[in-house]
Image (cartoon, grey):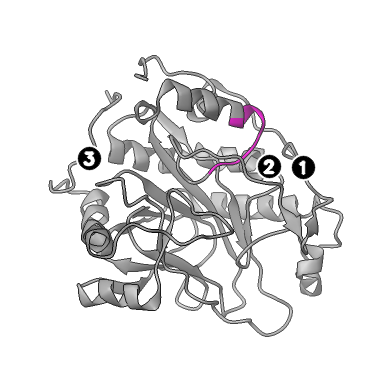
Amino acid sequence: MPHSLTELPDTTKSYGDFRDDLFRDGFVVIKEAISEDSAEKYKDSMIQWLETFPLGFDRHNPDTWTEENLPAHWKGGMYHGYSVAHEKFVWDARQEPGVLDAFKTIWGTDELLSSFDGINLTLPPPGPSPGPGTPWEHVDQSPHLKGIQCIQGILNLCPNGNVDGGLMVLKGSHVLNEKFFKIHGTEKKAEWGVVPDDWHGFNAEERKWFEENGAVEVKVNCGPGDLILWDSRLVHWNVRPVSKQTRALFYVCYTPASFSSKEELAKKKQIFEARERTTHWPHRNFWKADKIQRFGKADLLHRDRPSTEPELTDKLLKLAGAKPYCTEVEA
């Protein structure tokens, strides 16, 4: 029976499953974590969510798929505001057995905490594609944390090939992470006006260092219902579609509840009850995001609660950190 743990996974062992690829390459695609029918259902839920905003968005009229007709988003279609992290359909996806099982296997426990992350619904623009965007190579783990501390995930909902946008990685860069920071130092540049605790961006010269040391650029392709997992030490970024394919996905991440202190769990409970979001880290680095802006002004569409509240089951409350597991968590 899975149980809480205090040690990180042994990445040097051979497991005979997806963990071998994940630990070697820094990422892996798990096929059909959910069915294609379920993926289509969740994509439709995302579109229905857009329709709750009084902005003139019409799913049947691509001419309305513009900035003016959409709530505030980032880098093409990343939605983090409006309490979207706690919409019922988002929590339903987080509790899909095929998703949870992957993280249970990685961490060796079924006592997990979920991140309160957003969604991505990148719709093709009415006119020509603006292009894939500028790479923003980064890692999402503090250089002061050593070893495999967090595995990020994307639950993909649409066909996602070479020209359909998606996740780009430097394969193998996770094993170079500690060496890079020993050579280059751990000083971080500001992003969004702050210096994030678990974010470090790289410039072209620094990216070249990873490639000269064996890391290889890979576009991670996948199908509807597939689950992408990657080590937070892996250098990665995303690109926008240059095709007319919609990109739709959930950001999912889970770590053992035993990784959190009592104080952190208490704070996570407060964040959940306020229906606020966090970083992708489920057990640490919590912070309250400022209210988002739209076109540089206060967003009049701001919501403090989701449009449809999740069903507060025992399972959900434990994943949210709002109800303790039986195992006692050390401070």
Nearer the observer, 144 or 81: 144
Figure quadrant of residue 101: top left
Identify residue type, mark 1.
Arg
Residue 325: percent from left, percent from top: 42, 18
Residues marked 2 and 1 touching at CB (< 8 Å) = yes
| Quarter-of-image position of residue 70 | bottom right
Specify the quadrant that holds the N terminus: top left
Asked whether residue 58 is in view, the answer is: no
Type of amino acid at the residue the image marks with label 2 = Ser
Magenta highlight: main SS:
loop
**Among the two numbered marks 1 and 3 on one chain, the one whose residue lies closer to the N terminus:** 3
Amino acid at pointer 3 = Pro
Q: Residues within 10 Å of mark 2 (few under 14, many from 20)?
A: many
Residue occupying the far bottom of the picture: 128
Q: State the separation of the CA atoms marked 2 and 3.
A: 33 Å
Q: Residue at position x 51%, y 45% from top?
A: 279
Q: Residue 271 location, x and y as percent?
A: 60, 31
Looking at the rendered structure, the secondary structure element under dot 1 is: loop
The mark total stands at 3
Q: Residue at x 33, y 73 (%)?
A: 206
Q: Which mark is residue 180?
A: none
Highlighted magenta segment, given as a residue range: 271-278
Q: Earlier in the sequence, mark 2 or mark 3?
A: 3
Residue 273 within the segment the image draws in magenta:
yes
Residue behind mark 1: 303
Depicted 163 relative to depicted 168: above or below: below
Tell me the quarter of the image containing the C terminus: top left
Horizontal and vertical percent position of residue 306: 72, 39
* Residue at image mark 3: 9
Residue 83 is labelled as 2
